[in-house]
C-alpha cells in the first residue's frame, strides 16, 4: 500500500502521469485487502489520483474527486478527511483561480489540522494560503502568513513540495511589486526542481516566470521540459510562454481556449 502511494505521488511529479494513475488504482486495490489497521485511510489514494489528473490538465475531473471526498468527510464527521480535501481543492488556485473560495477552504483546513495537532499539514495549508492571498492582491496578509509559517521552524526538507513554498514567496513578492525578488525565488524553485527531478515544479517555476514578464527566459526550456511530461497542461504552459515571447496574439488566443477547456480558467484569463 505504501509503496504504491509513494510511487504514484513521485511519478506524478516526474511527469509520468499514467503510471501515477496506475499505482493509485493499485494502491487502492491493495488497501482493500489489508486486514490490520494502518496509519492512513483508503481515501489517500484518491488524493494521489487527483494529483495526477490535475497535472495532466484534467482539472474538472480532479476537482470532482476532491469535492466528493470533502463532502464525505463532512457527512461522516471526519475532520481529517474534510481538512485533507479542503486543502487539495485549494492547491490548484494558481491555475484555476477561485481565490476567495481557496482562501476560505485553506483557513478551514488549517483550523481543523490545528485541532488535530498536525503541524506538518498546517504548514501545507499556510503555503497555499499565502499563495492564494498573493494572487488576490492581498500582499500584507500573504507576508504575515509566510512569517507565521517561518515561525513554525519546520525544516524545509520535511515539506514534500518545497517548490510550492518558493512559488508562494515569488507571488507574494510580485504582489508587493518586487519583481526582482520574485524572479530570484522562481530561479531557486527551478534549481530545486532540477535537483530533485520534480518536473512539475520546474514547469511551474518556468511558467510563472513567463507570466510575470520573463517569457524569453522561460520559453525554450519550458518547451523542452514539456516533451518529457505527459498531459495537456505541460504542453499548454510551453505554448503560452512561447506565444508571450513571440508576441503572437493568435497563438495566445488559441492557448487561452485550451486552458479554458481543461478548467484552468485563471491561466485562460491571463
Image (cartoon, rainbow, N blue to C red):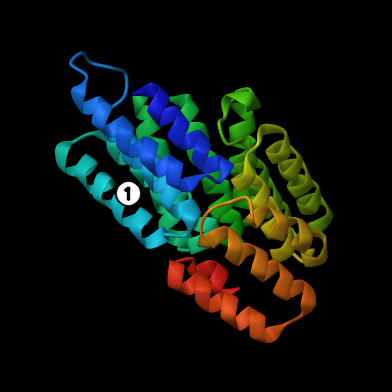
* Image-quadrant location for residue 43: top left
Is residue 111 positioned above or below 51 on the image?
above
Residue 176 lies left or right of residue 12; in this view the side is right
Residue 82 lies left or right of residue 142; in this view the side is left
Residue appearing at x 65%, y 86% in the figure: 250
Residue 218 lies left or right of residue 237; in this view the side is right
Residue appearing at x 51%, y 73% in the figure: 258
Q: Which residue is mark 1?
A: 66
Residue appearing at x 48%, y 40% in the figure: 125
Quadrant into which the N terminus falls: top left
Residue 5, percent from left and from top: 40, 30
Residue 152, percent from left and from top: 58, 26
Residue farthest bottom in this picture = 250
Is residue 107 positioned above or below 216 on the image?
above
Q: Nearer the viewer, residue 262 or 168?
A: 262
Q: Nearer the viewer, residue 78 or 27?
A: 27
Residue 149, percent from left and from top: 59, 34
Q: Nearer the viewer, residue 201 or 179?
A: 201
Amino acid at each position: 500500500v505504501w509503496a504504491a502511494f509513494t510511487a504514484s505521488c513521485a511519478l506524478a511529479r516526474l511527469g509520468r502521469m499514467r503510471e501515477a494513475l496506475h499505482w493509485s488504482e493499485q494502491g487502492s486495490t491493495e488497501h482493500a485487502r489489508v486486514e490490520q489497521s494502518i496509519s492512513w485511510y483508503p481515501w489517500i489514494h484518491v488524493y494521489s489520483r487527483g494529483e495526477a489528473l490535475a497535472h495532466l490538465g484534467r482539472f474538472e475531473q480532479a476537482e470532482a474527486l476532491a469535492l466528493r471526498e470533502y463532502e464525505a468527510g463532512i457527512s461522516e464527521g471526519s475532520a481529517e478527511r474534510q481538512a485533507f480535501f479542503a486543502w487539495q481543492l485549494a492547491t490548484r488556485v494558481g491555475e484555476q483561480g477561485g481565490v476567495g473560495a481557496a482562501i476560505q477552504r485553506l483557513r478551514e483546513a488549517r483550523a481543523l489540522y490545528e485541532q488535530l495537532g498536525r503541524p506538518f499539514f498546517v504548514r501545507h495549508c499556510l503555503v497555499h494560503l499565502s499563495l492564494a492571498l498573493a494572487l488576490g492582491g492581498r500582499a500584507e496578509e500573504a507576508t504575515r502568513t509566510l512569517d507565521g509559517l517561518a515561525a513554525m521552524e519546520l525544516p524545509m526538507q520535511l515539506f514534500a513540495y518545497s517548490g510550492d513554498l518558493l512559488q508562494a514567496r515569488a507571488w507574494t513578492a510580485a504582489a508587493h511589486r518586487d519583481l526582482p525578488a520574485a524572479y530570484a525565488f522562481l530561479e531557486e524553485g527551478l534549481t530545486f526542481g532540477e535537483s530533485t527531478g520534480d518536473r512539475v515544479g520546474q514547469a511551474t517555476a518556468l511558467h510563472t516566470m513567463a507570466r510575470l514578464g520573463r517569457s524569453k527566459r522561460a520559453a525554450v526550456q519550458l518547451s523542452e521540459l514539456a516533451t518529457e511530461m505527459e498531459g495537456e497542461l505541460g504542453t499548454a504552459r510551453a505554448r503560452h510562454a512561447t506565444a508571450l515571447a513571440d508576441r503572437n496574439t493568435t497563438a495566445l488566443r488559441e492557448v487561452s481556449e485550451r486552458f479554458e477547456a481543461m478548467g484552468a480558467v485563471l491561466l485562460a484569463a491571463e
